[in-house]
Image (cartoon, grey):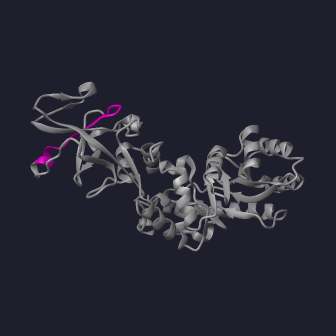
Amino acid sequence: MPVCVCRVRVNHDHLRHNLALLQATGKALMPVVKADAYGHGLTDVAATLAAGGVDHLAVGSVAEAVRLRRSGFGACIVALLGAVDDENRAAARAWDIVPLVHDWPGLSRLAETEAKAEKPLRVAVKCDTGMSRLGFAVEDMARVAQALAACPGLRADMLMSHLAVADEPEEDAYTRAQAARFGEAARALRAYFPQLRLSLGNTACLLTFPDLAGDLARPGLGLYGVNPLHGTSRAGAGAGLKPVMEVSAPVLAVRPLPAGRTLGYGRTYTALTDRLVAVVGIGYADGYRRGPAPATRICLRGVRAPVIGRVAMQMTCVDITELAAQGLDIRPGDEAFVLGGPGHAVTAWDLAEQWGTIPYEVICLLGKGRA
């Protein structure tokens, strides 16, 4: 039985469109499907991508990679969080998953566990070119290459890094500096592994600097129809992307709110005049955050209406007074769209700006477990 009444729809035609748009750059792709494909449903998204010619995928955990294998995806899968313990390392070996190696303790442990393997375990090496999270220092890459070459149980299959500000045109110098550092690391590792493949570019890089992306670009947000260049001077580069997710919930009740009455927890909203309120069946338990209500909108019959009062666990109130004045007869059972839908749809960027966050969080929260 479903635990909520809201609905998440994933438009696979739009997913195919976005994939084709990104493939038109001419770069081979390794789409990122971590975190349940950004809330869009891991195995279904992977099946659509595979049908579109994708033969590499990047997930977060080894467990996600195993799910993909069990669903029938037989091509290359890279686990971006690495093999964090012996169970993960055994699963990577058993299911032919490429774990990320990003530090000396991790490399040493893998070298130890794989020392007697009959067949080398493929690994992806992460270098830190300026994100300052995971990754070997670029200056250490020659030593990393030597260590890998000395271990017959491991084979460096890929070198990866991540761009910090590819979606910010004013930071182009930093992006190019990261790419230059990545080139240094690649030269050091390819001295021992000449067939090593390179992966650097995200969606923003792919759309604006495809020459920097490497052998395998890793699109994420753009694949799901959210333009990472929104609001910048390069927004047009991602203008053709189509949103893949839409989220709706039913109107549970329509009721008057007389002037002077307060609404909801904390009595944060007081009606200055007589209002008409729709109670919609979605709340923070469903990923719809308790953001600043005055800025937040929900779409009914293609028209946006303001959220009023506090968002509750499974209910949100919307002021539909103006919609009724326009002749729109909102009734219980009508579909209210919090993301996407017909008419003046609310976008992931809209919600991100209303909640004071980023569109990544919006689609992950709203889609989580329901796509």
Residue at the extreme top of the image, as rendered: 266
Residue at the extreme front of the image, as rendered: 1
Residue 86 image offset from top left, x and y in percent = 76, 38
Q: Residue 159 sits in which quadrant?
A: bottom right
Seen from the viewer's position, the closer of residues 237 and 286 is 286
Seen from the viewer's position, the closer of residues 333 and 128 is 333
> Which residue occupies 66% across, 61% down?
199
Magenta stretch? 311-324
Query: In what quadrant of the picture does the N terminus appear?
Result: top left
> Which residue occupies 78% across, 65% down?
187
Query: Is residue 69 covered in magenta?
Result: no
Q: Is residue 265 above or below residue 56?
A: above
Residue 154 image offset from top left, x and y in percent = 83, 53
Seen from the viewer's position, the closer of residues 339 and 64 is 64
Q: Residue 106 sits in which quadrant?
A: top right
Q: Is residue 274 left or right of residue 148?
A: left
